[in-house]
Image (cartoon, rainbow, N blue to C red):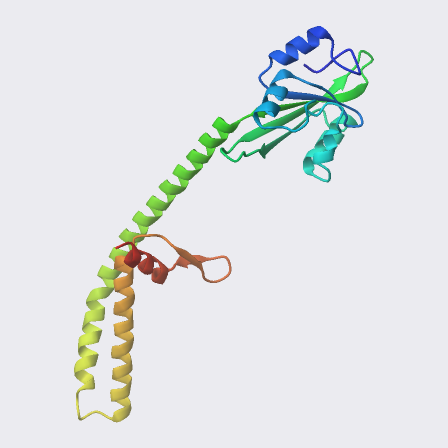
């Protein structure tokens, strides 16, 4: 419904129609004063221990939303800058999570003047919960795919590196034990051996990593954090 004939309140037939709607509806005048609420609004107020026995009638709608995006949106409808306004917002109770969709349309009289606005609050909790569940499943699938790629890539890299690394470790260790080489060469061989051992340790972390955990590298580039991935795997065992 986009038009009503009365500025102060709805007619009896209008009230009957509005009371039959599922949406929680409040009609406000140009200053924001609430001039009508439907039965769904009253029922919600009663179910949530709303302290005002008049369910907000004659109160100013803007009192609780001052300075917010919602206030700006509703005022834009009242002054004709917007043909309608909508906004999704959480309205959680102590016992459950809830989300509502606010839809605001201008209240227009028979001379096409805007004399107020109709605010409809639609409970969209089930849809929101379904959306959140889909998002969670998508993240889970993405993480699973990342983990799969990580394990396959780490295994392939480890396989390719292990053979030459084994040769480097063995030869550097043997050469470092020779007594006919200069001291500086022995020191360099020892450094090669220790560095190769560190590479071997990194490969072991790669093979044990099962969870994709990224870290920033250069600029906006991310790389796999094998230390974190390895630590998480160790804790999960």
Question: As drawn, is 133 to the left or to the right of 100?
Answer: left
Res 80 visible = no
**Residue 223 image-quadrant placement:** bottom left
Q: Position of residue 84 (x, y in %)?
A: 69, 25
| Number of numbered callouts drawn | 0
Q: Position of residue 69 (x, y in %)?
A: 68, 37
Quarter of the picture containing the C terminus is bottom left
Question: As drawn, is 218 to the left or to the right of 226?
Answer: right
Q: State the residue in front, 219 or 121.
A: 121
Q: In the image, what residue occupies the spot 64% across and 25% down?
A: 103
Question: As drawn, is 100 to the left or to the right of 134?
Answer: right
Res 142 visible = yes
**Residue 206 image-quadrant placement:** bottom left
Q: In the image, what residue occupies the spot 19% across and 70% down?
A: 166
Q: State the residue in front, 3 or 97.
A: 97
Quarter of the picture containing the N terminus is top right
131 is higher (above) or lower (below) than 216: above
Question: As drawn, is 48 to the left or to the right of 231?
Answer: right
Q: State the residue in front, 217 or 36.
A: 36
Q: In the image, what residue occupies the spot 79% across and 20% down?
A: 114
Q: Position of residue 91 (x, y in %)?
A: 57, 33
Q: In the image, what residue occupies the spot 19% across and 72% down?
A: 167
83 is higher (above) or lower (below) than 1: below
**Residue 199 image-quadrant placement:** bottom left
Q: Residue furthest top?
A: 13
Q: Position of residue 218 (x, y in %)?
A: 48, 62
């Amino acid at each position: 419904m986009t038009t009503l004939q009365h500025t102060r309140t709805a007619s009896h037939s209008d009230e009957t129609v509005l009371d039959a709607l599922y949406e929680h509806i409040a009609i406000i005048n140009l200053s924001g004063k609430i001039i009508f609420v439907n039965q769904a609004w009253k029922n919600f107020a009663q179910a949530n221990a709303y302290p005002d026995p008049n369910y907000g009638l004659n109160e100013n709608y803007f009192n609780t939303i001052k300075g917010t995006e919602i206030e700006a949106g509703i005022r834009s409808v009242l002054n004709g800058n917007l043909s309608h306004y909508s906004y999704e917002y959480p309205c959680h109770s102590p016992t459950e999570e809830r989300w509502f969709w606010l839809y605001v349309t201008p209240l227009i009289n028979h001379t096409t003047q805007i004399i107020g606005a109709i605010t409809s609050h639609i409970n969209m909790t089930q849809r929101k919960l379904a959306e959140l569940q889909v998002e969670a499943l998508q993240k889970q699938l993405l993480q699973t795919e990342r983990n799969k790629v990580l394990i396959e890539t780490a295994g392939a890299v480890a396989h390719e590196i292990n053979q030459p690394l084994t040769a480097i470790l063995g030869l550097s260790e043997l050469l470092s034990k020779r007594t006919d080489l200069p001291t500086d060469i022995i020191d360099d061989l020892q450094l090669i051996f220790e560095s190769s051992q560190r590479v071997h340790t990194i490969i072991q972390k790669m093979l044990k990593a099962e969870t994709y955990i990224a870290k920033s590298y250069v600029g906006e580039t991310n790389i796999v954090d094998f230390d974190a991935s390895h630590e998480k795997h160790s804790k999960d065992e």
